[in-house]
Amino acid sequence: MSDSLREQLEVVSQRTALDGLGDYAPAAGGAPTGGEFRQLIGEPILIKIGNATALNGSGTGHATAPTTQWKYAFVQVRKTAVAYGGWSTVTGGHASDAGAEIYAFNGMEDPNGSEVLGIGPTMSSMDTDAYRFWPLPIVAGVVVEARLFQFSVSGSWKQEYWFSLPNGLDGECAE
């Protein structure tokens, strides 16, 4: 984690403890003891979505169990030109890190399971004798607003970036 991000988290953690906007209870020395939660408060950042990695299902829409949740690689971007395009990576900005298990996640995918999808329909309503549809991951290159969440799991701090964007669908019809 960069020194700048660490300083931001410390300021936010102190503010969160004082203003009641989070459940932050640091242990001695700032080490997590389990159950602590920190959220960066303020403006969301802009990220450009990269490759998606399936978290459930078979990884294909043609299989019995299509994928409905993904984790996303990303980089923080800023606008540097008018209209479409013109997004530049922020030097030293937020980014996914496979080694540290830092990824972006889509809040619209959070309720996705074997039947109900966060975008509304059920899997059974999208799989009939006449047609079959399945959700797709967010396409690489899409720019979204995201927020950083930091929390502890088993005494270790974790970071996740969350955004919200409906997934597309793909499908096929019986001939």
Image (spheres, rainbow, N blue to C red):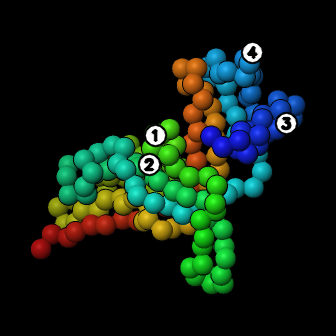
N-terminal of the two: label 3 or label 2?
A: 3
In the rendered picture of this protein, how many numbered marks are placed on residues?
A: 4
SS label for mark 2: strand
Q: Which of disc 1 and disc 3 is earlier in sequence? A: 3
> Is the Cβ of the residue at disc 1 closer than 8 Å to that at disc 2?
no
Amino acid marked by disc 3: Arg
Q: Report the front residue among 88 and 72.
A: 88
Assign the C terminus to one quadrant of the image: bottom left
**Furthest residue in direction right, as rendered:** 18
* Residue 137 seen anywhere in this rendered image of the structure: yes
- Residue designated by label 4: 28
- Disc 3 vs disc 4: which is toward the camera? 4
Q: How far apart are marks 3 and 2 (CA)?
A: 30 Å
Mark with earlier residue (3, 4): 3
The image shows residue 57 at horizontal and vertical percentages of 29, 45
* Residue at left offset 24%, top offset 62%: 132
Name which residue type carries label 4.
Answer: Ala
**Mark 3 touches mark 4? (CB < 8 Å):** no
Q: Name the residue tied to disc 1.
A: 99
Q: Which amino acid does label 1 sit on?
A: Gly
Query: Is the residue 35 above or below the residue 145 in the image?
Result: above
